[in-house]
Every structure is written in structure tokens, then in C-alpha cells.
Image: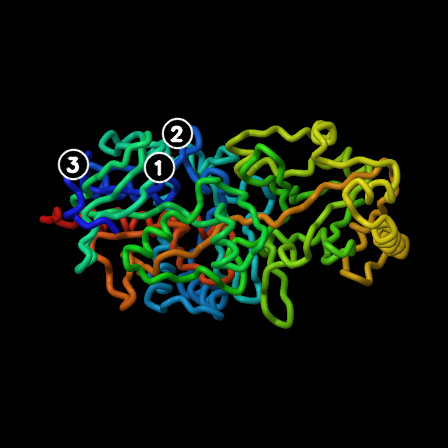
């Protein structure tokens, strides 16, 4: 932390300073403005303006809508059994969740956008991830705001821009808090902008909404134990907020749970792209398999794992699928799969939505780039991806024999997905573990106050969104964006009520 005495002059000041401009930061700014329209609100975003929005912009835009407080509370309690959420926080969250839909509808009306039931990219009216834990009772429906992609983010962005007293500064990452070393009271922030370090006073308080640490491999290794994982969302989420909050005296939580709350998904990573492509969720044909480091298959590749955020039940416990535990991975497929399946998902992820990389429908452009390896035989394909031809031929042969028998004894693929890899030429693409988001950060309460090691609020310091999320283990689709709204709204409303600091 930087002490107030170390600041010789304030380069700027505002009533409320918000670090991070995704849904959480936007919701905080809107709420603070509407609670006090005269308040000067400053949003500081690390990324350039063209890359604003964080994970909120690149996500699937699903919103969980619930109408039953007790059912939702029971469901989330069951999903969090291995690392319980404080009961008072859980109860208040469930109540606010069940009252949230009119607020979302009002934001959509204000922005001139269309709010709909359903995910927008799936025909399911409700995505029920863990029915045995109470999903059917807790989830009334899934919702979103059009257009797809990015409709929810675009709506909140439009609502912020309609409020002229909300200032936004881009390429302005927060690097530290200005804080009393004895009381921990927060007076402002230090920011890097255009090669200069600036001190910005926050008269009423600071809201941290800087996201997680998906794009920090060192943190992934040391905080979660993943040796090789890459982000599907913003490349800006490098754990800055966690480091700042550690220095600020905050207690930390949810850095390592039984699994990544958002799951570890299959992705594709290539030079000149700092984040990864998300593999297609809805294949039209199934003449393909995944292999791990030994050259063998390691799971039912075609199960709809996205419905459980890539969790599988093992010995009665829901844990991440083994993608991060099987070594080097490849997807092997034939000409039928290449022709009839675009290999990537286009409605979400940073590369598709923000960078707007237009992956060719038949994958031919990516074959030409060398991203997808091509060969006339399985043995030659194996050599080109530095694999043992005999091992890969044996793996493909066993799979094709299962297709002929109509039964996958190894991993139980559904009979309708047992289509042989038999139409040359053959293809391979390397698969990497891909992270949706992380939820760890500073411990907070339902009012979004950051808590110290005695679980007491640090004066004038708030936190919202993915950074320090309350979700401690399993995650129900549509909960992160709605939690960002709830925590952002609480932070904005509470900080703007404070009297200006006297220090």
C-alpha cells in the first residue's frame, strides 16, 4: 500500500473510484450515480477502449433467473458443500437474486435492447447443471439480452454512457491503494497511465472489480495447481486485484476449490492470439476423438459437458474433467468432421467475439495456416504431431471397432456418436486446457465490503464481480453475471452513501 503521507499531490479526484469495467464495474457505476446523481464517479479500465468489457463481453451472456428464494438457497448451499458460503450471505444473495429480473429488464429498456427468456444460442429455456442438487426447483429459467454475442455487456455499457457524470479512463490500470497503514482506511489509488504514475483521490471510496487471474500462468500454478492453462476471456485478467488486495490487508478466499468454478474446457491456442479459441459445443458429426499424452483416449468426448461446466462425477464428487491432468492433447478427426463442423464456438470467447477472428466454416483456412495438421494416413498424421504411429493407429483402431460394435466399452459414448474415423485425409489439432474464469480474491460480505483477517470491513474498500466471488465450488450457468450485478449494485450504493474522507 501507499500511505497518504507518500502522496505529495493528487493528480485527479472523484467521489467514487471504480477499478475495472465489466458488468460488475458498470453496475457499480450505475447504482452509485442513481443513488446520488451529483456524485463524480470515475471508472478506471486497464485495457484499451476497444477491448473494454472484460469477461462480461466475451461470455455466453446467460443470466440465471430464480423465483424461489428457499430453493435457490438450498441449491447453492448444496453446490458449495465442500467449502460453505456464510449462511447470512447465502440468504441475502438468494433474496436479491429472486428480485433481480425487473432490474435487468429495466436496464434493457433503458438501452433499447431486447430481454428474452433462454440463452439465445441454445434452444433450452433453462440450463439445469446439477438437477440432483436441486437445479430444477431453483432455476425458473435462463435469460439474456440480445444481440448475441455480448448483448448483456452492451446493454450495461449503454446505460453507463447515458449517465454523463460517470467518467471512464482506459489504459489506466490501478497498481496500488493509498491507505492508512494503521487503520487500513482507503483514500485513493495509484494508476499507471501513458508511462506516468498518477495519484487519484477517492473522496468516498474505492471499488475493486478487476476480474480474476486466468491469464497469469504463475498464479494458476501456485494458487490453483494448473501447470498449463489459458484464458478464454480477456487477456487483461492477470490477478492485479488479488495482489493489491493482499497488500491492503484483505483476507483471501476461493483461490483453490475442488474445481475451477467455471470449469476447464477444451481450447485451441495459436501464435499471435494471447487467449484461446473455445472448441465447438454442438458438433454435427462425430468422427473424432481426443487423445492425451499416452496416445490413448481419456473421456467420453461427445458428452454435453458444457451443461456441467466441464465437471464429471467421480466417486460421488463433482470434479473437473481430466483435461489438465492427461499431458499433451490432440483432437483427431477425418474429412467428414472437417467439412461439416466449424471447430470453434463463435458466440463466446475473446478471440471470436472481441478480436472477431472469423474461423472458416469448413476449417480450410486453418488447415492452410498449419493450425490443423493434415495427412493421408493415421500413421503419417501421428508422425507429423510427434506421436508414436503404432500407438495412435491402435487407439484409432480400437475406437473404430467400438463404432462397428455400436458400443464404447472404454468411455460409454452414446451409440449415435460412434462414427468411425475412416474418411481420409485425416487431421489433428492440439487441444489445451482453457479457463472460463477464476473466482478467488478478497473475502467480502453481501454488501461488497472487503474484509480483513478478522473478517472486519476495511474502511472505504469494496469489491465486486469475479474478483472475490462468493462461489466456492460448483457453478450454475448464468450465476456469474448476475452475481456481478448484485455485488456491483451493493458496492455502488454503499460507497456513495459515505461521507467524504477527512484524511
The number of callouts visible is 3
Tell me how far mark 1 sits from mark 2, CA to CA.
Answer: 8 Å
Labelled disc at residue 38:
3
Looking at the image, do the residues carrying marks 3 and 1 touch, with CB atoms under 8 Å apart? Answer: no
Looking at the image, do the residues carrying marks 1 and 2 touch, with CB atoms under 8 Å apart? Answer: yes
Q: Is residue 403 visible?
A: no
Task: Establish if 105 lies above or below 68.
Answer: above
Task: Establish if 348 lies above or below 68.
Answer: above
Question: Along the polypeptide, which appears first: circle 3 or circle 1?
Answer: 3
Residue 186 pos. (x, y %): 20, 51
Identify the residue position indicated by label 2 in the image.
49
Residue 387 pos. (x, y %): 79, 48
Identify the residue position indicated by label 1 in the image.
45
- Number of the front mark, 3 or 2: 2
Which residue is depicted at the point 46% across and 38% down? 57
Which residue is depicted at the point 66% across and 52% down? 304
Tell me how far mark 3 sits from mark 1, CA to CA.
Answer: 22 Å
Pick the residue in front: 335 or 144: 335
Amino acid at each position: 500500500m501507499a500511505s497518504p503521507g507518500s502522496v505529495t499531490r493528487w493528480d485527479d479526484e472523484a467521489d467514487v473510484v471504480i477499478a475495472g469495467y465489466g458488468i460488475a464495474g458498470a453496475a457499480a457505476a450505475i447504482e452509485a450515480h442513481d443513488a446520488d446523481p451529483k456524485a463524480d464517479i470515475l471508472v478506471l479500465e486497464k485495457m484499451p477502449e476497444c477491448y473494454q468489457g472484460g469477461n462480461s463481453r466475451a461470455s455466453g451472456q446467460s443470466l440465471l433467473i430464480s423465483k424461489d428464494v428457499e430453493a435457490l438457497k438450498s441449491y447453492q448451499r448444496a453446490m458449495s458443500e465442500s467449502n460453505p458460503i456464510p449462511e447470512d450471505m447465502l440468504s441475502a444473495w438468494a433474496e436479491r437474486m429472486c428480485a433481480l429480473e425487473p432490474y435487468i429488464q429495466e436496464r434493457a429498456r433503458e438501452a433499447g435492447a431486447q430481454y428474452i427468456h433462454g440463452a439465445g444460442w441454445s434452444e433450452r429455456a433453462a440450463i439445469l447443471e446439477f438437477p440432483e442438487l436441486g437445479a430444477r426447483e431453483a432455476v425458473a429459467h435462463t435469460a439474456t439480452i440480445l444481440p448475441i454475442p455480448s448483448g448483456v455487456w452492451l446493454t450495461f455499457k449503454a446505460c453507463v454512457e447515458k449517465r454523463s457524470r460517470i467518467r471512464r479512463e482506459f489504459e489506466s490500470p490501478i497498481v496500488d491503494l493509498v491507505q492508512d497503514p494503521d487503520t487500513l482506511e482507503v483514500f485513493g489509488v495509484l494508476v499507471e497511465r501513458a508511462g506516468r504514475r498518477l495519484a487519484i483521490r477517492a473522496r468516498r471510496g474505492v471499488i475493486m472489480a478487476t476480474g480474476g487471474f486466468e491469464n497469469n500462468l504463475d498464479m494458476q500454478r501456485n494458487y490453483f495447481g494448473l501447470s498449463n492453462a489459458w484464458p478464454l476471456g480477456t487477456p487483461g485478467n492477470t490477478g492485479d486485484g488479488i495482489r493489491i488486495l493482499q497488500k491492503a490487508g484483505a483476507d483471501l478466499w476461493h483461490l483453490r476449490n475442488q474445481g475451477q468454478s467455471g470449469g476447464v474446457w477444451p481450447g485451441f491456442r495459436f501464435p499471435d492470439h494471447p487467449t484461446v479459441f473455445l472448441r465447438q459445443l454442438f458438433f454435427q458429426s462425430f468422427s473424432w476423438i481426443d487423445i492425451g499424452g499416452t496416445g490413448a483416449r481419456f473421456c467420453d468426448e461427445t458428452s454435453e459437458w458444457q451443461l456441467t461446466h466441464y465437471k464429471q462425477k467421480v466417486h460421488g464428487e463433482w470434479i473437473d474433467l481430466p483435461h489438465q491432468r492427461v499431458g499433451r492433447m490432440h483432437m483427431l478427426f477425418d474429412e467428414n468432421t472437417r467439412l461439416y463442423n466449424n471447430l470453434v464456438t463463435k458466440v463466446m470467447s475473446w478471440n471470436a467475439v472481441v478480436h472477431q477472428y472469423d474461423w472458416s466454416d469448413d476449417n480450410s483456412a486453418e488447415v492452410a495456416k498449419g493450425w490443423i495438421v493434415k495427412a493421408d494416413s493415421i500413421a503419417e498424421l501421428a508422425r507429423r504431431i510427434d506421436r508414436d504411429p503404432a500407438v495412435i493407429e491402435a487407439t484409432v483402431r480400437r475406437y473404430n471397432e467400438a463404432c462397428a460394435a455400436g458400443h464404447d466399452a472404454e468411455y460409454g459414448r452414446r451409440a449415435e456418436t460412434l462414427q468411425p474415423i475412416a474418411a481420409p485425409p485425416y487431421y489433428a489439432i492440439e487441444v489445451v486446457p482453457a479457463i472460463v474464469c477464476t473466482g478467488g480474491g478478497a473475502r467480502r460480505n453481501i454488501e461488497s465490503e472487503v474484509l480483513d483477517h478478522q473478517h472486519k470491513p476495511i474502511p472505504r474498500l469494496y469489491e465486486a464481480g469475479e474478483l472475490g466471488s462468493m462461489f466456492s465450488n460448483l457453478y450454475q450457468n448464468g450465476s456469474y453475471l448476475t452475481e456481478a450485478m448484485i455485488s456491483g449494485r451493493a458496492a455502488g450504493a454503499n460507497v456513495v452513501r459515505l461521507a467524504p474522507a477527512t484524511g
